[in-house]
Amino acid sequence: MKLRIALTAAAVGVLMTVTGCGSDEPAANGTPGAATSSSGSGVTGTVNVFAAASLTESFTKIGKDFEAANPGSTVKFNFAGSSALATQINQGAPADVFASAAPANMKTVTDAGNGDGTPATFVKNQLVIAVPKGNPKGVKGLSDLTKPGVKVALCAEQVPCGAAAKKALDAASVKLTPVTLEQDVKAALAKVKLGEVDAALVYRTDAKAAATDVDGIEFPESAGAINDYPIVALKGAKNAAGAKAFIAYVLSDKGKAVLTEAGFQSP
């Protein structure tokens, strides 16, 4: 009997020892011994990002990477011309982040008091002449766009790519009459891809993203018409923490790597 009691006591001691080996760290639900988890910066919920059309491919990739690093988060994008996005924001559209293709459109938002903090320039972009694959019209520079029978698409002047195009054309002393003025760079590029025009002035990144359909012709005047891209969190953001975390990710080495791969230049 004494031996049986001793063995029982020993078994209880072993059980208590094993139980005590569990983690004393509380889990997310406060239960001692439960496993903890890591979720990036811990941001959850939806982050609404209004971004220039030229950021479509790179920000879509960054958005997926951000979601993977922050389980429980969702990034929703509104891609359009920066001028249109600025107007939407100032009219009260629900947005957490604004990434513009030019400082002028960003200033429209910050002057209206809708920015939260100082905008940060995160990339630069430069124009090229987009032509159908194989360059059937033999375009080599801006002056070739004025030749008879060459149809050209430009962005409207209030759009960053349109303002940059005007600056480059003025620098080259080239007077050009486009057959269409588009409200964002993707729309101008689409005219080339669809064969509706022979050329369009678009960003280098857009031509690279559409390299299976178009060729990008570099021209020297573009160096004097480079656009800075600023990004800022917005006042009244429904997900302020998400906005700041998304911007931090864009500015991180991982975000920069995606943007560089897309053809953007460092600020």
Image (cartoon, helix red, strand yellow):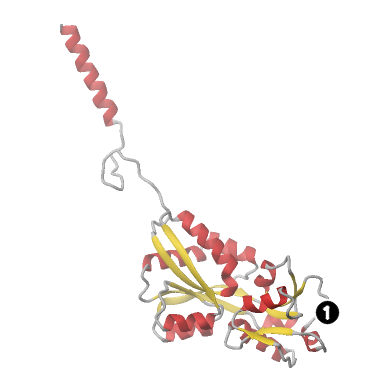
Can see residue 64?
yes
Looking at the picture, how far across and down is residue 65, in whole percent?
52, 57
Which quarter shows the N terminus?
Answer: top left
Write down the quadrant of residue 262 in the picture.
bottom right
Quadrant where the C terminus is found in the figure: bottom right
Q: Which residue is mark 1?
A: 137
Q: Position of residue 211 (x, y in %)?
A: 72, 67
Closer to the camera in the image, 114 or 80: 80
Residue at the image point whose x is 66% and y is 72% from the top: 206
> Looking at the image, which residue is at 54% across and 59% down?
254
**In this picture, residue 246 sits left or right of residue 155:** left
At 44% across and 77% down in the image, what residue appears?
118
Reply above or below: 47 against 36. Answer: below
Image coordinates of residue 243 in percent, x first then y, are 42, 68
Residue 2 horizontal/vertical position (percent)? 15, 7
168 left or right of 21 in image: right
